[in-house]
Image (cartoon, coloured by chain):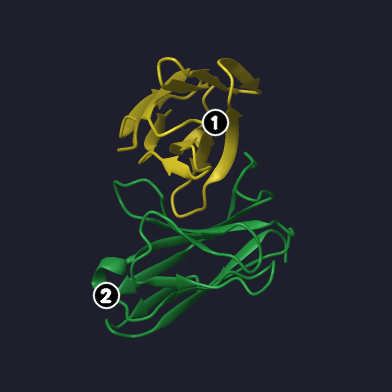
Amino acid sequence: GQNIDQPTEMTATEGAIVQINCTYQTSGFNGLFWYQQHAGEAPTFLSYNVLDGLEEKGRFSSFLSRSKGYSYLLLKELQMKDSASYLCAVLDSNYQLIWGAGTKLIIKP
Amino acid sequence: IAGITQAPTSQILAAGRRMTLRCTQDMRHNAMYWYRQDLGLGLRLIHYSNTAGTTGKGEVPDGYSVSRANTDDFPLTLASAVPSQTSVYFCASSDSQGFGTDTQYFGPGTRLTVL
């Protein structure tokens, strides 16, 4: 079966750095997405990786290793507004997104 | 309208009733999707449409039906609601025909409770 694993919850301090990991086992791979979802709101797109390596976008970076079935989202200079759930999703061989359950990130002052 | 809208925002429904969740996008995206999101689970695809006039089944299609008469609208119908269909429903769209990797954009969601 297809499986996406992420930690359920993480806590970090304002101004710090946090890394959210995602491991996947899917039937085929056509890219990996990270989305942010604030409580009670819709998911919003953060990043897309299809090749190995690091993609940097401001305070957020996303890394992919296809051989290891592994990705992480790195958030720097954490702000209170970064408190949200972070969803990892893989585009499988049928070009359908398979979603992880999400990681709830709690930022403390 | 800018982006994707969904209606209603929330609804309480008696079991056995028929319900249609509406979704409209103004981005002229080819592909549209319906997901449900339940606590502790990832988003699960119910149905999708790669282009107007075509639809397909996702991971959890039972008890739901969709239609895609035009590019903009993609309603989801529960023919006879059951309590297990209590969930938050998200509609999404992408500028893709199912073979690309374009980003999916989500509507604000409909919170449905079936009693």
Tell whether B25 sits left or right of B22.
right
* Chain label for disc 1: A
Whole-percent x and y of residue A83?
Answer: 46, 37
Q: Kindly identify the amino acid type of the residue bearing the numbered disc 1.
A: Gly
* Chain label for disc 2: B
Mark 1, residue position: A31
Residue B98 position (above or below residue A105): below
Tell whether B28 sits left or right of A100.
right
Write the residue at 31% across / 67% down: B86
Residue B25 position (above or below residue B69): above
Q: Kindly identify the amino acid type of the residue bearing the numbered disc 2.
A: Val
Quadrant hosting residue A53: top right
Write the residue at 43% across / 56% down: B58
Name the colour assigned to chain B in the rendering. green
Residue A63 position (above or below residue B99): above
Mark 2, residue position: B82
Whole-percent x and y of residue A56?
Answer: 63, 19
What SS does tag 2 mark?
loop
Write the residue at 65% across / 60% down: B51
Q: Residues within 10 Å of mark 2 (few under 14, many from 20)?
A: some
Whole-percent x and y of residue A90?
Answer: 47, 35
Write the residue at 25% across / 67% down: B84
In the drawing, what numbered circle is on residue A104?
none
Chain letter of the yellow region: A
Q: Residues within 10 Å of mark 1 (few under 14, many from 20)?
A: some
* Quadrant in the picture for the C terminus of chain B: bottom left
